[in-house]
Amino acid sequence: MRIARLDRLDAARCAAWPAAPRDDAPAYTRRDFLRGAAVLGGGAIAAGLAMRVSSAEPLATMPVPRHDHAGGQGSMVFQSGHTMRGARTMPPGAPADDQVTYREFDMTFELVEHEVLPGVRFPVFAFNGQVPGPVFRVQENDWIKVNITNKTEEMHTIHWHGVDVIYTMDGVPMSNQDPVHPEEVFTYRFQARPAGTRFYHCHWGTPLHMMSALHGAFIIDSPDDPIRRAFPYTRDYVLMLEAFDVNMTRQGIDDLLSGMKQVNQLIARRRPSHLAHGFFRNYQEFLKAIDAGWRPPYLAGMANPAAAEIRPNFFAINGKSFPATMEHGHIKIRSGEYIRIRLINGGVFDHHMHLHGHQFWKVAEDGNPLPQPLRLNTVPVTPGKTVDIIVFGDNPGFWDFHDHKESQSRNNGVYPGGMITMLEYEDMGEVPYVPSISINQ
Amino acid sequence: MSKIKTHLKIGGALVLSLLVQRGAFALELDPAIFPEFTIGGRAVATVNAEAMETAGGGDEQDAKLDIGDSSLLLGFSKYLFKPGQYAYAGLGLRVAEEQRDIAQGMFLSQAYAGIGGPRYDLVMGRHRLPNTLLHFPVLREDDLLDFSVVANASSVSSAEEDQVFGNLVQAAWWWRPAWKFDAALTGRAERDVGGALGAQDFNGASIGLAYQLPTAFKVARGLRYAAVRIDQQNARAVAGLDNVAVSSLLAALSYHLNDDPESDWAADVQAIVRSGVDVASLTNPAARARAAFTSVTAALRYAHRPQLQTRWRAALLAAWQNYGDFNEANALLAGASYVYRLGSGVDVAAQYFYRRNDDVLAAALGYQSDHRVQVGLVFAFDMIFNESVAERGGLLDFEHHMGGSGPAGLGE
């Protein structure tokens, strides 16, 4: 039933787009891919090469995910005498290895010091130690297996945002899985669908963990991509939009790691106290704990509203603030070329991306193609959203592409900075004015 | 940044022009310069009951309300131009202990400024003196003052104004995150009979070496703190006593007895040895601070922290002191303290101490023994606004060498 419904939706969606013969779509060559992926960092390149293989099986023959989770077992954290430190966890619900062919990836949760701007470094949690995490580039309906190793002292999960995964793989702690404990290896298995611009992020301690900086792009390609048919783009950019409160992040990570020393000690002694970390079997048990005198941490938070406030002071594209966006996030185009830019909001603040000198097409939202492309020059990207735009090279020059919420085009309050990058034409020849750098206006 | 420095040197005229041009946004107005602001303090209110046996064998009993040691501290921090470096200042007010011998209800306990970085710290001003190594779990500063602090040999007052606080310039260097070396020039209060404060000269020095591994960094049984310190005083002539040099050696250990963060047991011990100089009697505090002296103070601490939330803490304390040049005159103290947490920073506290002086000390101090009970409330708070300056002692700096100190995360 589910597959049939997806087919109908796809058919209806495609009908709204200008028809283009399949053969007209330019081949997405390996060279093009590398050129596009170059802006995404080394991890993106590696992941993309590994994953960019079309599925040979038609959709209708793919096994339907089984929801064969053992009923009523629930979380391990309530079972006395256990430790999940160093465990290998492969939750049920996905086909066995001999039923489908998995594309397998190894990832890590790490604590690293990230340089968002020359001279500005702060501690973050990061996938594979990089900000943002590596770009996944897979084909629709690929079966994905991700083995994630927690190399930190804090707990984490991965939520595959916008991907219709099996519910045991959705990465929401205590809702459909236990958090991934320190030294634990947790395996996510799911089918990559539907096609489009998706992303992934940690869902444990989400405000801090997703913001700083456990987030990354998950791009699901399809040979039947209506956007490619309508706009034969030759380069594909992914821009992760980020907001960093470096003070909150530093203090938050410092505090929680200090606390985790004690929590992890209880776990090591096989005497974890679920109350110590705010775990409850159900709401009634929570109420019972309150009646018994347990004091929830939000009472401390209420006493200190300033500490609860997120005040980002560095805004970034692909982990870098202007002018360091020249390293990651600098977009290039040639006259007469279509490029696709995938905007992903990896933080918890709104961004309003404005491109100078061009009217672009907004072609997809939340990864799903729009019924009709919209002609815009500014597009909002709110938290949790992905927006795909197509830019046509028809106005050679150097063009600002920036967050028009200008308070976020600053570095620690100093303009210009933050979420500013540039669209640069590569074929201008001799130019009348060459851009330079100004960081204090 | 050098441009900013240059402009800052222009001085008042430029500041005035900036005030006039409020709409302008010039380089001199670095928007990042806004101090971190900390306000902290505590109110301690107890009912004290005391039963004393005088040196003559009589009994004295007393009961009173005590708000001594209540305090307010304002702290400010901001970053220097060089990444990873910061400056700070503090201003502290304190209610004098009820048994003070100086006619002040409230006094300026601290007023200092300092600079620091990931591996160093320099502070100067009126500050807590480096004359003790451990802070024992007692309600008030003066509860163990006779035993656990190197006394001020230049003051006839035993009040904490002169004994705990003083002027200093102190530099500290951490060559490993857990290892610290420090050196200080100290200016202890010089107070003669009559109460007037004398010159504010430097009259001492101190060097220390410490190993410290806080529980927040490692939950395990073992040594958490070990330190030694040499304290030198060039005591000034007061109360008929001559100028004289007095040296003291301090050593301390803190040991965690178990590795259970929900039931935390620890033991602390500190010893002070002073070779001393000849004095005629022990009647005057300045004379006692010069005499040959040995003390040992120890505590056994327990924290009950179900679900990692502190509910109550208790401690047993014992202390002994000896004046070797006065026929081994000595005193013993034993006691217990208990704190039950009602809310964040709000405690019910109780403490009992028994002290017995031998005959020589009883004659000098005026009492043979003393039972003292304190029961009351403690309200403590520590709020940080515009939090931006990282702690050098934070876990990230201590364990990962990242994100420690530096402007808005601008660590080196």
Image: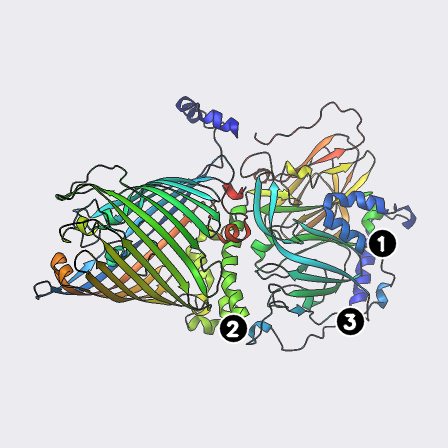
State the separation of the CA atoms marked 2 and 3. 34 Å
Residue B25 seen in this snapshot:
no
Q: In what element is the residue under mark 3?
A: loop
State the separation of the CA atoms marked 3 and 1. 28 Å
Nearest the eye: A436 or B149: B149
Q: Nearer the viewer, mark 2 or mark 3?
A: 2
Amino acid bearing label 1: Asp
Please, which chain is the residue tagged with disc 2 on? A
Amino acid bearing label 3: Ala
Earlier-in-chain disc, 1 versus 2: 1
Q: Residue at x 39, y 47 (%)?
A: B38
**Is A170 on the left-hand or right-hand side of B209?**
right
Q: In what element is the residue under mark 1?
A: loop
Residue A291 rendering spot, x and y as whole percentages: 42, 72
| Badge 3 density bin: few <14, some 14–19, many ≥20, Cα 10 Å | few
Q: Are marks 3 and 1 on the same chain?
A: yes
State the separation of the CA atoms marked 1 and 2. 53 Å
Please, which chain is the residue tagged with disc 1 on? A
Q: Nearer the viewer, mark 3 or mark 1?
A: 3
Residue corresponding to mark 1: A224
Residue corresponding to mark 3: A96
The quadrant where residue B244 appears: top left
Q: Residue at x 61, y 30 (%)?
A: A438
Earlier-in-chain disc, 3 versus 1: 3
Amino acid bearing label 2: Arg
Q: In what element is the residue under mark 2?
A: loop
